[in-house]
């Protein structure tokens, strides 16, 4: 049975789209029974509808607190029989209630090399700090923001005088490759967690690595 993945997103949803496209192309062996958004106007919902994926749109301000909002989301995820959750630009911290009541793996994506530059503006903060290398990270979610055990990271050099938009678009291109890869590993049951350390078990066929970036663990065939 393929992994049943719920996606939570607040905005454009280009990463949700990368997963949908990889699933449709047959390189990502999952089902996506639900895409939920706390922003009823988010473009990710249109992407879901185009792909025939059921959606749950809500406004978190309609709930009395974070816990009741998270309980409602978990109820939808349960109804849709999902095994795992991917946060793809979901700009809200998940509560203890969400993580314990759902109980399954939850993954997140961040546009920086964690633990550097957590928060809402990973790329902007890296530029402002003046680092010369940044990138993207996929990690398991725990109760702290952008904090849990790391699954895969991609690093790129920052170009001289690079704008935030230019940098973000290069980071997005990497995210669209490493996030489906991390989810495929999860679906294959190859991610073993021990404390903060995630080990990738087994060995897949090597994939095509981007020339402009260093990705670890390396991408496998089809990703
Ligand atoms: C992605 O760049 C992701 O790394 C970031 O939101 C963007 C969503 O883009 N997430 C965070 O900053 C989490 N702290 P998308 O809507 O086009 O997929």
Image: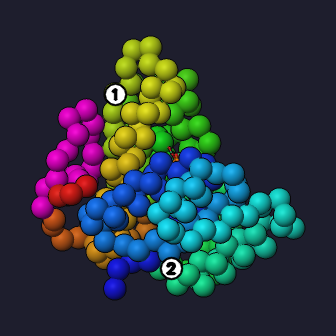
Q: Nearer the viewer, residue 9 or 198?
A: 9
Question: From the viewer's perspective, is 190 left or right of 118?
Answer: left
* Badge number at residue 157: 1
Residue 115 position, x and y percent, is 49, 46
Q: Dot 1: what SS?
A: strand
Quadrant that contains the C terminus: bottom left
Whether 208 is among the magenta residues is yes
Does any atom of ligand 1 lie closer than 8 Å to the CB of label 1?
no
Does the magenta stretch mainly form a helix, a strand or a loop? loop
For discs 1 and 2, the disc positioned in front in the rendered view: 2
Q: Residue furthest top?
A: 161
User: In the figure, 198 relative to 119: above or below?
Assistant: below
Question: From the viewer's perspective, is 24 left or right of 167?
Answer: left
Residue 188 position, x and y percent, is 28, 74
Residue 152 position, x and y percent, is 34, 54
Q: Dot 2: what SS?
A: loop
Marked residue nearer the N-terminal end (1 or 2): 2
Residue at image position (33%, 33%) is 156
Q: Residue furthest right?
A: 64
Residue at image position (59%, 83%) is 78
Which region is colored magenta?
205-220
Whether 8 is among the magenta residues is no
Question: From the viewer's perspective, is 74 left or right of 129?
Answer: right
Quadrant that contains the N terminus: bottom left
* Badge number at residue 82: 2
Q: Quadrant of residue 192?
A: bottom left
The 10 Å Cα crowd at callout 2, few under 14, some 14 to 19, many 20 or more, is many
Residue at image position (34%, 38%) is 155
Does any atom of ligand 1 lie closer than 8 Å to the CB of label 2?
no
Note whether residue 212 is visible.
yes
Q: Nearer the viewer, residue 93 or 26?
A: 26
């Amino acid at each position: 049975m393929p992994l049943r993945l719920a996606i939570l997103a607040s905005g454009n949803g280009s990463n949700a789209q990368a997963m949908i496209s990889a699933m449709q192309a047959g390189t990502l062996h999952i089902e996506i029974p639900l895409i939920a958004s706390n922003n009823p106007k988010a473009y990710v919902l249109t992407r879901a509808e185009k792909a025939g994926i059921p959606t749950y749109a809500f406004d978190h301000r309609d709930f009395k607190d974070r816990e009741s909002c998270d309980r409602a989301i978990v109820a939808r995820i349960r109804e849709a029989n999902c095994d795992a959750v991917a946060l793809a630009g979901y700009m809200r911290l998940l509560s203890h209630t969400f993580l314990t009541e759902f109980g399954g793996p939850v993954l997140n994506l961040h546009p920086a090399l964690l633990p550097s530059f957590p928060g809402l503006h990973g790329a902007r903060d890296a530029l402002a700090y003046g680092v010369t290398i940044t990138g993207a990270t996929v990690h398991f979610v725990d109760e702290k923001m952008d904090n849990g055990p790391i699954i895969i990271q991609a690093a790129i050099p920052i170009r001289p005088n690079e704008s935030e938009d230019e940098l973000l678009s290069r980071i997005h291109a990497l995210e669209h490759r490493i996030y489906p890869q991390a989810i495929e590993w999860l679906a294959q049951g190859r991610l073993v967690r021990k404390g903060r350390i995630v080990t990738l078990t087994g060995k897949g066929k090597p994939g095509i690595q981007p020339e402009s970036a260093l990705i670890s663990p390396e991408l496998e065939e089809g990703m």
